[in-house]
């Protein structure tokens, strides 16, 4: 084992306020002792958290692997309904730390892009959901529903059933709203404090900026404690909607990729550091970013990031376009990429110069 002493760069307090980095000592599996000096504008994180992604270790799955995520600096991730309540528990590697929302569809996204029509749950299935939730409290965060898949009747049934079982099991509900057939008002009436509204800035049917009433309902929902999640994905982010809602004071609580094997390392998403670069180019502050990928997810998951871990993002000055799902592009003069990733003492990535001591 060795000790790596890392100095310089810009770190953050728990509220997301940036300040000078006084130094971090890491015990690493590399046997040498090293000193690494960072540039003043390098951004230092204890690890990144992707609040909403799709993770799976089976071959041919929709989900990305844990190894792919940790290569980008993600050390904790919320899997948002890749697996359903009817599937057995999956054995994960130690890192990234996995938290799960179980889909109310029994086999989750196993048949994706086909999404089975939801016809409700039998009494026996209701008992099975409750037992599954109660037996996996440490890992399972809550339930997930996907509105906007087939028709109005299904959307209403999903919302009513999801809300009922989430309340019964005393867990939050995550609601995918892209393409929903329901009004914003009907959705918000079913949500409680701690429930998550994901794909908030999508521009398809059911967009939350479609009229004044929808925006007012969204603001009231935020005031009541509903969590707003970006859930960017390939189809769920519109620059126009983002700018209009931001003008109303609506910002995401959590910054997440909704990444899958189909979108990993591809535009308009690429990975979590790319998404952070995109939002910085749009005018969010580093404080907004830190709260969205560290502070708020940690508080929500009631977890801690692993010891002896660090992620350093460095600015690469190069002209880059950040597209949305509708073809609109925001152009910036650079982006932020991970140059150092150490997870629980394991050096995952190191593109920095160093000296041995």
Image (spheres, grey):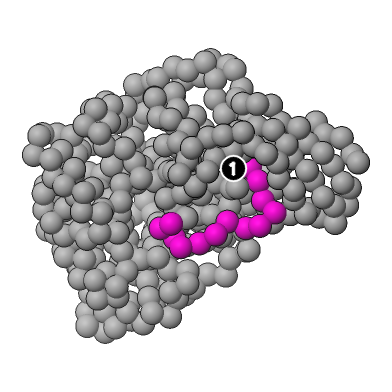
- Up the image or down, 235 lies above or below 84; here it is above
- Please name the residue shown 21% across and 31% down the image: 248
Q: Is residue 261 visible?
A: no
Up the image or down, 338 lies above or below 254; here it is above
Quadrant that contains the C terminus: top right
Q: Quadrant of the N terminus?
A: bottom right
Left or right: 320 as drawn, with respect to 71: left
Residue name at image x 28 percent, y 42 percent? 200
| Residue 116 picture location, percent across and down | 29, 61
User: Which residue is located at x 43 percent, y 74 percent?
Assistant: 137
Q: Which residues are magenta?
A: 299-313
Where is mark 1, residue-wise?
A: 45
Neighbor class of circle 1 (other Cα within 10 Å; few <14, some 14-19, many 20+) is some
Residue at 31% across, 37% down:
251
Counting the numbered discs, the total is: 1
Residue 52 shown left or right of residue 190 in the figure: right
In the rendered image, residue 175, in percent from the top left (x then y), is placed at: 27, 55
In magenta segment, residue 300:
yes
Residue 78 relative to residue 152: left or right: right
- Against 237, residue 156 (above or below) is below
Q: Residue furthest left?
A: 213
- Quarter of the image for residue 311 reads top right
């Amino acid at each position: 084992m060795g000790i790596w002493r890392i100095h310089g760069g810009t770190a953050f307090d728990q509220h997301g306020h940036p300040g000078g980095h006084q130094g971090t000592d890491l015990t690493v599996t590399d046997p040498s002792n090293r000193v690494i000096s960072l540039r003043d504008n390098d951004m230092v994180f204890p690890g990144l958290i992707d609040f909403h992604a799709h993770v799976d270790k089976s071959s041919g799955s929709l989900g990305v692997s844990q190894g792919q995520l940790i290569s980008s600096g993600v050390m904790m991730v919320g899997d948002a309904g890749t697996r359903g309540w009817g599937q057995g528990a999956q054995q994960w590697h130690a890192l990234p730390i996995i938290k799960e929302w179980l889909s109310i569809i029994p086999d989750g996204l196993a048949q994706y892009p086909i999404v089975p029509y939801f016809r409700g749950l039998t009494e026996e299935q209701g008992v099975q959901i409750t037992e599954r939730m109660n037996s996996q409290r440490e890992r399972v965060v809550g339930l997930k529903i996907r509105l906007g898949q087939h028709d109005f009747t299904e959307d209403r049934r999903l919302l009513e059933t999801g809300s009922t079982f989430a309340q019964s099991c005393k867990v939050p509900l995550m609601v995918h709203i892209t393409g929903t057939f329901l009004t914003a008002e009907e959705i918000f009436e079913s949500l409680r404090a701690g429930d998550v509204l994901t794909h908030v800035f999508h521009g398809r049917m059911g967009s939350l900026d479609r009229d004044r009433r929808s925006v007012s309902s969204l603001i009231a929902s935020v005031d009541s404690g509903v969590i707003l999640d970006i859930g960017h994905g390939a189809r769920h982010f519109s620059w126009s909607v983002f700018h209009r809602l931001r003008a109303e004071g609506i910002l995401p609580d959590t910054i997440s990729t909704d990444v899958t094997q189909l979108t990993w390392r591809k535009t308009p998403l690429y990975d979590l550091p790319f998404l952070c670069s995109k939002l910085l180019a749009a005018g969010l502050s580093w404080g907004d970013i830190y709260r969205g990928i560290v502070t708020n997810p940690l508080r929500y998951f009631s977890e801690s990031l692993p010891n002896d871990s660090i992620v350093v993002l460095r600015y690469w000055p190069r002209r880059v376009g950040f597209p949305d799902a509708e073809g609109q592009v925001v152009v910036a003069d650079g982006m932020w990429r991970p140059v150092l990733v150490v997870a629980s003492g394991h050096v995952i990535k190191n593109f920095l110069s160093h000296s041995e001591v």
